[in-house]
Amino acid sequence: MTRIFRKSWAMLALLALGQMVVVPSQAHHSFAMFDQSQQVKLEGVVKEFQFTNPHSWIQLMVVPSEGAEAEQWSIEALSPNVLMRNGWKRNTLKPGDKISVLINPLRDGKKGGNLILVTLGDGTTLGGGA
Amino acid sequence: MRAGSAPKLAAAMASIAALALAPVSLGFAQETARKSDPPAFDLTGTWWVTQPEGAAGFKPDPPLKPEAQKVVDEVQRLRAEGLNARDKTGTCMPPGLPLIMTRVYPTQIFQTPKLITMIYEYHNAVRWIWMDGRDHPQGEDLIPTYYGHSIGWWEGDSLIVDTVGMHTDPDIQPGVPHTEHLHLRERIRLTDEGFVTEITMTDPTIFERPWVTAKRYKKSDAELQEFVCLQESNQFSEDESGVLRQVAPVKSDDQ
């Protein structure tokens, strides 16, 4: 089932990942546009994974509520240089993969955010952003 | 005023540009034929700037003149609204010096007697520090570049690096502008974990007094990887008031 919820388990995951996440200077722009006081967990299906500099992007299709039409979220992650050092590969995400992501959402309410971590279908968790 | 427009930024920068036209005495211009001590160490290898001071700019905060403070205040006001202003690397423009020192990516250094080359993974940037006794180009021969013109020499246990000619396009850190008179003097020394560069920045139009800051580096076994900032995959552009806007988040058009 695909849905959106906000939970504090995310903080535990963050603590577990330690300094691997929260490294804003590995970004090439400031993170003012993201609401870093909020964390949102999304579950969805990968539409597209852009493993590119300066930043990588996940286009994720998310069903907001049961029976509703899927909405596209644009999730920004760090550069391939940083992600590869965090264990990512170019094919870590493929179209059709069911994943969950934890993000800092955009402040302006649009469907987007900055990736904190991703959980793959097999349960693997990778730090992905800042 | 519509949300996020920044006319105050443009006005503040115009007054800085006018002030920067006034002649200033640049103390480094007449220094020639420096005597250099023997090399005190070899920086050849790969290094990583340490956290947390490596992140998010230079500390402590700069001693700004009132006109420059207006620019900083306006950028911070916009940031509180969730808007990135004066953050040109967000549009794939080169970070230049000294901003590149605030990025947490590895740096590979090759030291030879007459030239020290620094390769920054971030933006595939290269910096050449001439150790052969030459001076900076003067007047019309000094062409602004993103990483400036650097010369170096040895003083006891320190490597001194002097840099001028930095392009004014990128800020020192987002929101802290500089003029063509920005001058960096670095004193690099070994530490227990690597090296430290103490940086003294001067720019008479921007700073009340020299801004003294530092970056520390640790030895790293990282291998550098290519980092080309692709305009095509970048999703931000700068509007006329200097604010970054996200453009077309979706590359494919089948949605």
Image (spheres, coloured by chain):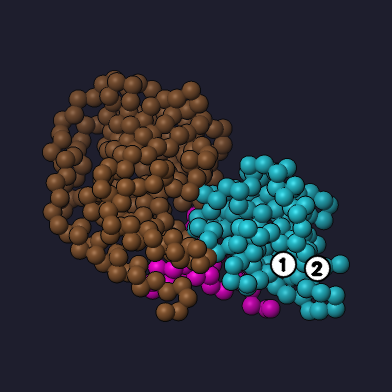
Chain colours: A cyan, B brown
Q: How many marks?
A: 2
Q: Residue at x 54, y 45 (%)?
A: B225
- Relative horizontal placement of residue A37, taking residue B173 as reference (left or right): right
Residue neighbourhood size for the residue with mark 1, other residues' Cα within 10 Å, grouped as few (<14), some (14–19), many (≥20): many
Q: Which residue is mark 2?
A: A3
Q: CA distance from mark 1 to mark 2?
A: 12 Å
Measuring from the top left, give residue B78's x and y in whole percent: 45, 66
Give the mark nearer the N terminus: 1 vs 2: 2
Measuring from the top left, give residue B137's x and y in whole percent: 19, 45
In the displayed structure, B157 sits above or below A96; it is above
Residue A13 belongs to the span the image colors magenta: no
Residue A45 in view: no
Location of residue A20 (image quadrant) = top right
Residue neighbourhood size for the residue with mark 2, other residues' Cα within 10 Å, grouped as few (<14), some (14–19), many (≥20): some
Residue B242 belongs to the span the image colors magenta: yes
In the displayed structure, B218 sits above or below B235; it is above
Say what amino acid the circle numbered 1 marks.
Leu
Q: Residue at x 24, y 65 (%)?
A: B15
Say what amino acid the circle numbered 2 marks.
Arg
- Tell which of A98 and A129 is nearer to you: A129
Residue A79 in view: yes
Q: Quadrant of the C terminus of chain B?
A: bottom right
Parent chain of label 1: A
Location of residue B212 (image quadrant) = top left
Measuring from the top left, give residue B203's x and y in whole percent: 25, 49
Q: Which residue is mark 1?
A: A60
- Relative horizontal placement of residue B21, taking residue A112 as reference (left or right): left
Characterize the magenta stretch by its predominant secondary structure: loop
| Nearest-to-viewer mark from 1 and 2 | 2
Numbered circle sitting on residue B201: none
Q: Which residues are magenta?
A: B228-255
Measuring from the top left, give residue B206's x and y in whole percent: 27, 53
